[in-house]
Image (spheres, rainbow, N blue to C red):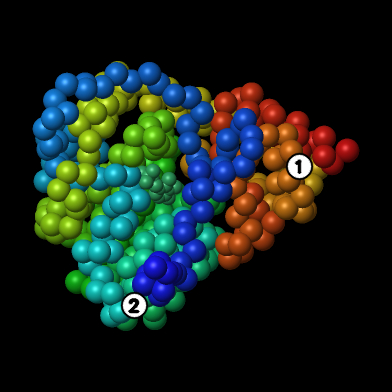
């Protein structure tokens, strides 16, 4: 049997998402997936594994809704924010007819999910100031059902002006969902738009425990939206998406103690991020360093490929962003521990000597 011949043509042609684990590499300093540098030692209950879990476990839903300041009916738990992206496209876009739109440079999974499902991809680049270009979006809106906007944006670390989002919501009312990807919300909690959900039935917010909560390996994310949107997504999601030990650990991460630990981590990372930004700006060969509201720093180099290799030779793995529009010669460096940040700077300075 020739599996390739049997496969859907678009899967044959698909370039899969270049995840950190798929890219691999040899190193001991992993700064290419915006993971937290520290792991906590969680205990889970392994008792009733003979039973299927709740599809949407109420203690977890209630804990996250409380944390996010929304109602339980506006909350869906899924296997990472990535599954939220996939579910939104599956529930709202007809393959071969509808389209999704996003604003590069940004996160890569919007494209991969749309392509797998045969949904057309429209891109409207962010303006030079990092903001969505509303008049260009308006011109591209035909058949668009879902618009993804990452805030603060990965990989640039920049925030979207809330007034732009209000204008976008006005433009898209009754026409398309506006999905704000808040994977990095904890790094600038004042920027969340969760408080707008009651005013806009077409606003959707994505969240995750993978970044500030240091639980990327748990695979737990959330969709926050109008109750009607959540009910549609519940029709599409697998019947038992969340393993019971996952729900158990996620619920513990949202207790007052868990939240306090997360906030201490965010404070530590924010301090180390400023150290990294300042040190990069004082490093030869670094041409531009973006301000950042996420746990990563984007920098433009004289020769990013050579810098990437020099870092890799020292066991430091970062993310090449050079193929994204306007990000030629740019690397994204996750903010690791202070020692890891120091190793990055030391390795860069050694190679410019
Ligand atoms: C990391 C990331 C995600 C994926 O989060 P998971 O919950 O681990 O699937 C989604 N969006 C953005 C912008 C991210 O950076």
Question: Which quarter of the picture shows residue 11?
Answer: bottom left
Residue at figure coordinates x 40%, y 21% from the top left: 40
- Name above or below for residue 150 compared with residue 214: below
Number of residues whose C-alpha sits closer than 10 Å to that of mark 2, classed few (under 14), some (14–19) or many (20 or more):
some
Q: How far is the residue under mark 1 from the one under mark 2?
A: 43 Å
Number of residues whose C-alpha sits closer than 10 Å to that of mark 1, classed few (under 14), some (14–19) or many (20 or more):
some
Q: Is mark 2 within 8 Å of ligand 1?
A: no
In the picture, measured across the screen, residue 272 lies left or right of residue 249, that is right
Q: Nearer the viewer, residue 37 or 163?
A: 37
| Nearer the camera: disc 1 or disc 2 | 1
Could you say whether the residue bearing mark 2 is in a helix, strand or loop? loop
Residue at figure coordinates x 65%, y 53% from the top left: 330
To which residue does mark 1 refer? 310
Residue at figure coordinates x 19%, y 53% from the top left: 237
For marks 1 and 2 on the same chain, the one whose residue lies earlier in the sequence: 2
In the picture, measured across the screen, residue 285 lies left or right of residue 226, that is right
Question: Which quarter of the picture shows residue 190?
Answer: top left
In the picture, measured across the screen, residue 177 lies left or right of residue 301, that is left
- Name above or below for residue 46 compared with residue 313: above
Q: Looking at the picture, how far across and down is residue 72, in whole percent? A: 13, 41
Could you say whether the residue bearing mark 1 is in a helix, strand or loop? helix
Residue 75: which disc? none
Q: Is mark 1 within 8 Å of ligand 1?
A: no
Image quadrant where one finds the N terminus: bottom left
- Name above or below for residue 22 compared with residue 167: above
Q: For residue 286, say whether it is visible.
A: no
Residue at figure coordinates x 68%, y 34% from the top left: 315
Question: Which quarter of the picture shows residue 68?
Answer: top left
To which residue does mark 2 refer? 141
Q: Looking at the picture, how far across and down is residue 89, in whole percent? A: 28, 64
């Amino acid at each position: 049997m020739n599996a390739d011949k049997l496969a859907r043509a678009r899967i044959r042609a698909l370039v899969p998402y270049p995840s950190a684990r798929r890219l691999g590499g040899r190193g001991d300093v992993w700064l290419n997936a915006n993971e937290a540098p520290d792991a906590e030692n969680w205990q889970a209950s392994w008792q009733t594994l003979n039973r299927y879990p709740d599809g949407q476990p109420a203690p977890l839903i209630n804990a996250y809704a409380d944390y996010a300041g929304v109602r339980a009916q506006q909350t869906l738990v899924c296997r990472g924010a990535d599954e939220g992206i996939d579910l939104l496209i599956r529930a709202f876009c007809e393959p071969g007819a509808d389209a999704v739109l996003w604003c590069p440079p940004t996160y890569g999974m919007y494209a991969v999910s749309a392509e797998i499902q045969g949904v057309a991809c429209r891109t409207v680049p962010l303006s030079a100031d990092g903001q969505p270009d509303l008049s260009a979006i308006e011109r591209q809106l035909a058949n668009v059902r879902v618009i993804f906007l990452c805030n603060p944006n990965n990989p640039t670390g920049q925030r979207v002006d809330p007034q732009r989002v209000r204008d976008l919501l006005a433009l898209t009312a009754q026409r398309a969902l506006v999905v704000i990807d808040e994977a990095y919300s904890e790094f600038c909690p004042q920027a969340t738009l969760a408080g707008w959900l009651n005013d806009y039935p077409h606003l959707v917010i994505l969240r995750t425990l993978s970044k500030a909560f240091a639980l990327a390996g748990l695979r737990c994310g959330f969709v926050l939206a109008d109750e009607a949107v959540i009910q549609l997504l519940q029709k599409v999601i697998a019947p038992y998406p969340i393993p019971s030990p996952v729900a158990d650990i996620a619920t513990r991460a949202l207790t007052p103690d868990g939240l306090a630990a997360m906030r201490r981590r965010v404070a530590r990372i924010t301090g180390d991020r400023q150290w990294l930004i300042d040190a990069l700006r004082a490093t030869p060969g670094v041409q531009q360093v973006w301000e950042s509201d996420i746990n990563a720093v984007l920098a433009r180099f004289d020769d990013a490929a050579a810098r990437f290799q020099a870092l890799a030779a020292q066991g430091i793995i970062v993310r090449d962003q050079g193929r994204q529009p306007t990000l030629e010669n740019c690397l994204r460096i996750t903010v690791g521990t202070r020692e890891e940040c120091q190793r990055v700077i030391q390795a860069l300075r050694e190679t410019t000597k």
